[in-house]
């Protein structure tokens, strides 16, 4: 069996044995509530919405059509995990093409785990002169290792137990971002 086959088999086993924490339907309902909360605060602020690539892409695609007000959309790419299961330094890949100075910014990401990624992005936007920076995540992982000064996002759709998660944008070793719910790896 080739290395590639072993890898495929492992990836399939991870999916087959994973625990589904939230189905696509659960998530859609949670995103309706998230959109209402964001709209209450931001509807008149013409925000610049920044999708954090890669993990934020599914949340952004599902949430933005539920935000019924003027906004602009761009993306930012910063990564800490780089397909590993442990985070390290925040590495910048792409900064937004749209000017952040003077804008109210809404940063969208898949998961708030230790918080370093969103804290770093928020601080970068503030350094570029954003007038306010809000953060929203699909899921907040529940544990007491929130190492960043930022302890939670301004808007959180769902919470999850302290396991490695994948699906709805979150990867397992670069795969399964397309899984149609939020899953916990069963190690
Ligand atoms: O709260 P933290 O501990 O900082 O972790 C959260 C970050 O980790 C993941 O990104 P990753 O670095 O894996 O890049 P990805 O978006 O390409 O998956 C996720 O998308 C968040 O951005
Ligand atoms: N895919 C994924 N990325 C993360 N980044 C930080 N925590 C996690 C996690 O549980 N799953």
Image: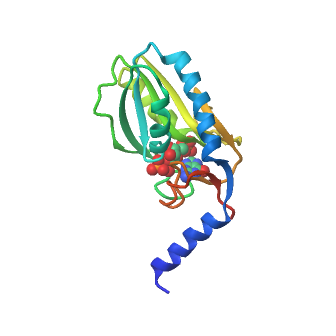
- The structure residue drawn at horizontal position 55% and vertical position 75%, both measured from the top left corner, is 9
The count of marks equals 0
Q: Quadrant of the C terminus?
A: bottom right
Query: How does the figure colour the protein chain or chains?
Result: rainbow
Q: Residue 186: percent from the left, percent from the top?
A: 69, 62
Nearest to the observer: residue 59 or residue 95: 59
- The structure residue drawn at horizontal position 33% and vertical position 37%, both measured from the top left corner, is 95
Q: Residue 53: percent from the left, percent from the top?
A: 42, 44
Determine the image quadrant of residue 144: top right
Q: Is residue 18 above or below residue 110?
A: below
**Residue 47 visible from this viewpoint:** yes
- The reply, left or right, for residue 37 in relation to residue 104 is right
Q: Residue furthest bottom?
A: 1
Nearest to the observer: residue 123 or residue 22: 22
Q: Is residue 165 above or below residue 67?
A: below
**Residue 153 visible from this viewpoint:** no
Q: Residue 120: percent from the left, percent from the top?
A: 47, 35
Q: Residue 127: percent from the left, percent from the top?
A: 39, 25
Q: Residue furthest top?
A: 44
- The structure residue drawn at horizontal position 55% and vertical position 68%, both measured from the top left corner, is 11
Determine the image quadrant of residue 105: top left
């Amino acid at each position: 069996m080739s290395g590639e086959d072993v890898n495929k088999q492992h990836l399939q086993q991870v999916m087959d044995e994973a625990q589904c924490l939230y189905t696509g339907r659960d998530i859609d309902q949670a995103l309706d509530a998230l959109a209402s909360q964001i709209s209450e605060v931001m509807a008149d602020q013409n925000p610049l919405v920044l999708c954090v690539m890669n993990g934020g892409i599914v949340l952004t695609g599902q949430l933005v059509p539920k935000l019924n007000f003027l906004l602009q959309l761009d993306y930012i790419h910063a990564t800490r995990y780089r397909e590993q299961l442990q985070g390290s330094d925040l590495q910048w890949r792409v900064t937004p093409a749209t000017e952040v100075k003077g804008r109210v910014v809404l940063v969208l990401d898949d998961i708030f785990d230790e918080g370093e990624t969103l804290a770093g992005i928020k601080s970068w936007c503030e350094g570029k002169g954003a007038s306010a920076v809000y953060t929203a995540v699909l899921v907040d992982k529940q544990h007491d290792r929130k190492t960043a000064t930022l302890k939670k996002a301004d808007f959180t759709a769902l919470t999850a137990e302290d396991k490695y998660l994948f699906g709805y944008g979150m990867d397992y070793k670069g795969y399964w971002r397309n899984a149609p719910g939020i899953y916990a790896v069963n190690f």
